[in-house]
Every structure is written in structure tokens, then in C-alpha cells.
Image: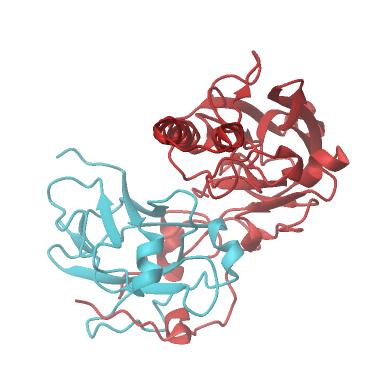
Chain colours: A cyan, B red
Amino acid sequence: MAYKPQINIIAVVDVIGALSGGTLHNGNLCLVDNAGEESTGQGTAHLRTAVRPGQVVQWSALAVDLQTPVEIRSITFLGEDGVATPATRTSAEGDGDKLDLAHWAGVVPPSLPSGTPFKYRLELQMYEGRYSVLHVDSPALIGV
Amino acid sequence: MAQQLAIIVLVDIGNALEANSLRDNVYLFDNMKLHGSDGQGTGDLVTAIHGAYWRDGSQATEQVLNWLPYSLGSLPPTVPRGYESERALQSDARALEELDALTAKPDATDPAADLNEIRKAVGTRVKTTRRTKGRLSGQKVIDLTGEIVTDTSAGTYSYPAPVITDIYGQAVDEKIMYPAEYGSPDLVTDGWYWSATVDSSRPGTYSYSMRIQLHRLVQRGSEALWEPVNLTCESALRVTSEPKVNGFTGSGMGLLPLDPYPSSAQGAEYFQPGPQQPGPQQPGSQQSGVQQSGLVEEER
């Protein structure tokens, strides 16, 4: 597989299904990347994206029904205990109407150990209000 | 933003025709309330258009608008396309059965009155003109329950759906939006719909007008026909544009914050982030929205 300078991860969200069921599981979230065959879990919420040091990884969200709103609220890498530490917590957690201004992209660090999955929490916001935010802790980046 | 914008144009056709104006007889809604649209459910909707630009000033997002005209006081647009014609055929069949029964009746005391009743039940086919043919062809005047209307003076009939025939005005003249009518497989809108792309790089409020065609039922001698009536209503777009910011750093792109690689410490090795830009981040906010909502998703 040729080295790609940028990997794209798209979160395809059935917003109505997610809000109705209160979950991003049960097929309401499909994560897909273009990293090639080394990635696993394509089309599921358990995507493991194969990445190499120096690559840019970019996340974006897309609603299955194009007229429903969904934005990435935050992406937080989790520690070994599965808990986000303050140092790694990210927060573009502002007003729901500003989330579309956030561009979720970053460079894979140069000394990324291969074979180690870095799980992250993907938090999505669908419109606004008490029940508008859902997340999954299941996706990961894995060095190859 | 990937979300497509929809503007619903709901017309009170009966009152609009009576007043010969859409003023106070049109209700506009869009799906951008979250982004600050004003006047939802009124005739004075201002649709919020969020634009965004990259650090080099180039446009970062595109917006697409769709207009969907609906009617107050018409059959719902979701009934099958052939519903009106189907109801017309059914009324014809029923009239034939009643005629059969009448001729078989040996002791008809007042056949003229009976025939008159049947004639009423048959209703009147609406004559179509070159401009109103198509879906309206072969229809009869029916009410909201699909029953044939014989006395059209009562005004209890279902109007044909409103049709947008043009979108024009300041927002078009100044090339803020590029509207066009497209063919659509969605028969709810009669196979056509208006859509526009929007230049979100020029902030400001821009008005536009919609020309909307309604149909008035008129009686010409023994014939009824749908006569087109063209009216206009106004609306506006309010375009804003703000800079894109990196979700991880709040400014330029850096290293991913993979523990133990805090992004703030090492991002500069690869990139020189620009000056801090206003963004969605709320400094000091550490509270997860999930915890707020109580909808914590455990990994499964």
C-alpha cells in the first residue's frame, strides 16, 4: 500500500435513528476510512484506522439524511484505562451552532509505536438540547 | 456544513386568493433555527447561512438551499399521485351503478329528481387549459376527504398545490445565490423543485422574492376551470462567515494528542500555528456534554 499523506475518517450518522434510540450503536454510526486494507471494522463503530507517523488524519461527520444536522463535538484520545486525561481531553465544546467551524485534523506523532491501538471517544452533536449529544469509545487509531 | 437547507413555503391558498396577496397568507420555515434563522412560521423568515473560511481566506463550506411549497387547505401531498383521478373514476362508476338501479326500478315516481341527484353525485370535471394541464387533467373538484364537491360556491374544495415559478431579487442579482428549477423523482413536488447554491463568503442580509402560482376555481358557463394566479412573497438570507479552527488545538493543525504525545508540546515541530482565532472552544470547559445529557454510551 502506497504511503498516503492524509487519511480521512468519515462518521456516517443516521441522526434520526440515533436520537430515537438514544444510541450511536445498532447501526446508527458507520465509521469508514480510506487507509486501506490494514484498517479493520470498516462501516462499524469499531473502526481501527491504520496510521503511520507523519500522516494527517482528518475526521468529518456526514448525516445519512442530508437535511438533519450532525457535527463532531469532540474527539478525545483515551488512556490505557479508557479514561480521557485532562492532558488529552479536547474540547470544541462550544455552542452547537458553532461546531461546524471546527476542523478535526492532526498529525500522527513521529514515534508512534506500531501495533498499539489508541482508542478515542468520538462525541457527536445532533442539533441541540439535553439529548442531543452521544458518543462512542470504540474507534481507534493503530500504528502500522 | 454538509447539512442541506430546506425552506418550506406553506401557503393558505383560499385566503391568498381572496386577498389576491400572499401577505399574511404565507408561512415560511427552515431547518436553520439552530444557526439563527429568524421569523420561523411567519411570512418574514430570515434564513441564516453559515459560511466558513480557511486561514488563507478561501471558502471552506458550501451551502445548498431547497424550497418546498406546501398548501394549507389541500389534499396532503403524500397521497398517491393518481388519487384525484382515481376518485373521479370511482364517482363515475358509482353514478353508472345508480343509473342502472334507477332504470331497473319499476315504480320510479320522480325520475327527473333521481337523475338530478345522480348528476350531482357525478360532479364536474375541471376543464384544463394549456397552462393547467398535466396533473390537473381529468380531475373533478373534490374536498379534503376525497369526496366529490358539487357546490363549488361553498369553497370547501381542495386547491392544487402551490407552484414556485421563479426566485429572483437582490440575493440573485448580487450573485449571492444561484437558484434554478430542477427535475426531481419526488412526485410530492410534482416532479420539480427549486434549489440554489449560496456564496457564503460575502456576509450580509440579502432579500429575495418568490413568484408563486396558485389556482383559482372559476365557473365559465357550465364549465369549471382552474385559472392560474401569480403572486409574490419576500424572504431573505443572512450570510455570516467565520474562520475554521482546528478542533484539537483551537488554532492551526498540530500533532494528534495521543497519550503520551500532548499536541501542544510537539505540534510546532511540524507546523507553525497561526495566531489564535475565535472558535467554538470554550476555554476551561471540561465538562462532557455526554455527562450533561446522561446518555453515556458504553463501548459494546
Residue B227, placed above or below residue A85? above
Residue A3, placed above or below residue A137? above
The C terminus of chain A is located in which quarter?
Answer: bottom left
Task: Tell me where residue B40 appears, x and y as whole percent.
Answer: 71, 58
- The image quadrant that residue A25 belongs to is bottom left
Q: Using the rendered image of the protein, determine whether residue B115 is visible from the camera's viewpoint.
A: yes
Residue at the image position 34 percent from the left and 72 percent from the top? A21
Q: Nearer the viewer, residue A95 or A17?
A: A17
Task: Tell me where residue A69 appears, x and y as whole percent.
Answer: 50, 58
- The image quadrant that residue A96 belongs to is bottom right
Task: Please identify the residue farthest to the top as the structure is shown.
Answer: B130
The N terminus of chain A is located in which quarter?
Answer: top left
Q: Nearer the viewer, residue A90 or B12?
A: B12
Task: Tell me where residue B265 appears, x and y as whole percent.
Answer: 43, 70
Residue at the image position 63 percent from the left and 59 percent from the top? B275
In the figure, is residue B25 to the left or right of B97? right
Residue at the image position 80 percent from the left and 38 percent from the top? B17
Residue B152, placed above or below residue A78? above
Q: Using the rendered image of the protein, determine whether residue B204 is visible from the camera's viewpoint.
A: no
In the figure, is residue B186 to the left or right of B34? left
Q: Nearer the viewer, residue A127 or A122?
A: A127
In the figure, is residue B268 to the left or right of A44? right
Task: Tell me where residue A121 appears, x and y as whole percent.
Answer: 33, 72
